[in-house]
Image (cartoon, rainbow, N blue to C red):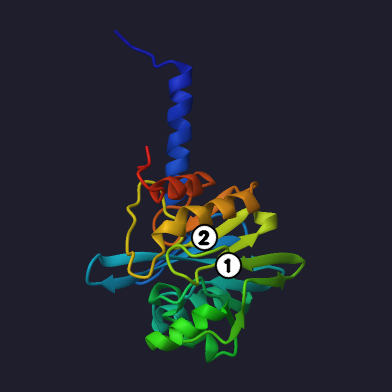
Amino acid sequence: MTYKLPISILFCAFILLNCKSHKTQTTYSSETLKIIPVSKNSFIHISYLSTNDYGKVACNGLVYMNDGEAIVFDTPTDTETSNELIQWITKTKHHNIKAVVVNHFHDDCLGGIEAFNELNIHSYANNATIELAKNEGNPVPQIGFDTENELTLGNQKIFNRHFGEAHTKDNIVSYIPNEHLLFGGCPVKSLNATKGYLGDANVGEWSKTIAKIKTAYPDLKIVIPGHGDYGGIELLDYTITLFKTGQSPK
């Protein structure tokens, strides 16, 4: 006897398989660097940080390309891997790197910034990030701003903004309107993630900060966390619930 699955179930299975393959698709892969396309112009770069508490941690950054130029959001975790990313952008994709934007002062955001500084590529960060990086003895971005920063790539705008404290007191997010994309970095959690490292966090303000971001950018289609799989605006909802006092994500 042959049993046929209902068309609705087959369709759902097809969609799920496509979603899974989209998330695991890579355009570049080595032992130290992985690059995943999320749109025609935007690519997640993944490098790895060795930690005492969490072992080898995969760390997300972003490359956005337009009109022959590129902006990098968070560097890979060290100089060597940053040079590997620079080679991919400039030699493989044939784009000039206009700027680097740093999410916050930890190594998983700016550990490789000296590779960009040596090429005279402008690096931007919250002024608080620059001060905290100096205090930690970490590499330091070159150009600071207080709350908001606007960059232009070709004919497209990129907005970098500090909405409040969360993972750290200085953390920002970066918004690309024409892509409906938010690079949230470590303030944003991937689905089913734990709270992670809280040594520099403001847990009491975390949910409020993410709620402000959700209100400011209601049209988001792509949200990239600092670690783990990217998704949509549901990552903001998950993060808000995760850090609400007395609540747990469903």
Q: Nearer the viewer, mark 1 or mark 2?
A: 1
Residue drawn at (42%, 57%) of the image: 204
Q: Relative to the observer, which residue lies in front, 72 or 67?
A: 72
Whole-percent x, y for residue 82 in the image: 45, 79
Q: CA distance from mark 1 to mark 2?
A: 11 Å
Residue 49 in percent (x, y) is at 32, 72
| Disc sitting over residue 54 in the figure | none
- Tell me: 63 left or right of 138: right
Q: For residue 189, what is the image quadrant?
A: bottom left
The N terminus: image quadrant: top left
Q: How many marks?
A: 2
Q: Earlier in the sequence, mark 1 or mark 2?
A: 1
19 or 183: which is nearer to us? Answer: 183
Type of amino acid at the residue the image marks with label 1: His
Note whether 149 is above or below 8 in the view shown.
below
Q: Is residue 25 above or below residue 161?
A: above
Residue at label 2?
184
- Number of residues whose C-alpha sits closer than 10 Å to that of mark 1, classed few (under 14), some (14–19) or many (20 or more): many
Disc 2 residue type?
Gly
Residue farthest right in this picture: 155
Residue farthest toward the top in the current orientation of the protein: 1
Q: Residue at x 58, y 67 (%)?
A: 162
Which x, y percent locates residue 247?
Answer: 37, 42
Residue identified by numbered label 1: 162
SS class of the residue under badge 2? Answer: strand
* Percent x, y of residue 215: 62, 49
Q: Give the residue displayed 50% in from the left and 72% down from the top.
A: 170
> Could you tell me which secondary element the residue under label 1 belongs to?
loop
| Residue 39 appears anywhere in the view | no
Residue placed most toward the observer, 205 or 67: 205
* Residue 121 visible to the viewer: yes
Instruction: Please state if 122 lies on the left or on the right of 61 as rendered.
Output: right
